[in-house]
Image (tube, grey):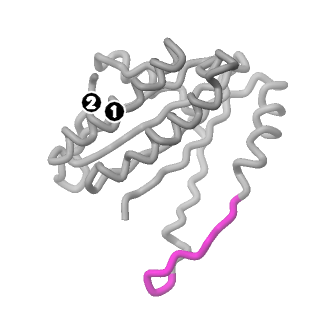
């Protein structure tokens, strides 16, 4: 598994990703188990100290939806980060070829590319008063189907990324 390395405010971080392949849960008798295992793997991120992870969904110009899980942690949590990313290989036991973890920098960079260049960021940190977060329902998930359908008609590339931070 390849992890990229970079610095944020003089602190070294590692970043890895898991690509969910097209038709990932294609065996109808195993679909429910696959989604349960995916959810279980995503929730294991709590074991990564001071880490962040994101779920990225991209509708490309060919009408294919691509899913990517991106995980980031300080170098001191590299072992836990690797263990977290490796947990997704259990999905391959349910449906072979359903995930891919890049093993080289070129594969990692290729998988990470493709996010649309025009972006808008919604930052939930702006919805805090006295250390209390306000619930904000941006209703993005419910609207993604409509947004992706319209973008597909015009052969646009559109992406959605949700970032989760450890508390």
Would you place residue 156 above or below residue 6 in this image? above
Q: Quadrant of residue 109?
A: top left
Q: Is residue 17 above or below residue 110?
A: below
Residue 23 lies in what quarter of the image? top right
The mark tally for this picture is 2
Crowd class of label 1 (few under 14; some 14 to 19; many from 20; radius 10 Å) = many
Task: Please state the horizontal and vertical placement of residue 6, each as a whole percent of the image.
Answer: 24, 40
Frontmost residue, 118 versus 111: 111
Between disc 1 and disc 2, whose residue precedes?
Answer: 2
CA neighbours of label 2 inside 10 A, class few (<14), some (14 to 19), many (20+): many
Task: Check disc 2 and report its element: helix, strand or loop.
Answer: loop
Q: What stretch is highlighted in magenta?
A: 129-138
Residue 27 vs residue 58, the one in the foreground? 27
Q: Which of 132 and 60 is in front in this view?
A: 132
Which image quarter is the N terminus in? Answer: top left
Q: Are circles 1 and 2 on residues that touch, CB within 8 Å?
A: yes
Residue at left offset 65%, top offset 16%: 26
Q: Specify the quadrant of the image occupied by residue 122.
A: bottom right
Pointer 1 residue: 16
Measured in 3D between alpha carbons, the distance from the residue under mark 1 to the one under mark 2, in whole angstroms, is 5 Å
Secondary structure of the residue carrying tag 1 is strand
Q: Residue 164 location in percent, x, y? A: 46, 53
> Which residue position holds label 2?
3
Out of 151 and 133, give the one closest to the viewer.
Answer: 133
As drawn, 87 above or below 39: above
Residue 85 place in picture, x, y as percent: 35, 33
Would residue 117 be found to the left or right of residue 75 on screen?
Answer: right
| Residue projecting furthest to the top | 96
Please report the residue visible at 46 percent of the width from the left and 42 percent of the height from the top.
Answer: 42
For this view, does 137 lie left or right of residue 34? right
């Amino acid at each position: 598994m390849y992890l990229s390395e970079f610095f944020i405010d003089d602190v070294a971080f590692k970043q890895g990703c898991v690509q969910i392949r097209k038709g990932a849960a294609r065996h109808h008798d195993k679909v429910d188990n696959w989604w349960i295992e995916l959810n279980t793997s995503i929730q294991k991120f709590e074991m990564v100290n001071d880490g962040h992870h994101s779920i990225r969904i991209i509708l490309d110009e060919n009408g294919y939806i691509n899913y990517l899980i991106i995980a980031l942690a300080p170098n001191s949590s590299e072992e836990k980060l690797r263990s977290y990313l490796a947990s997704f290989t259990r999905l391959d036991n349910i449906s072979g070829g359903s995930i891919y973890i890049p093993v080289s920098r070129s594969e990692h960079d290729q998988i990470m590319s493709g996010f649309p260049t025009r972006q808008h960021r919604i930052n939930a940190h702006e919805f805090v008063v006295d250390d209390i977060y306000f619930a904000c329902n941006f209703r993005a998930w419910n609207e993604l189907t409509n947004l992706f359908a319209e973008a597909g008609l015009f052969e646009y590339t559109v992406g959605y990324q949700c970032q989760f931070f450890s508390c």
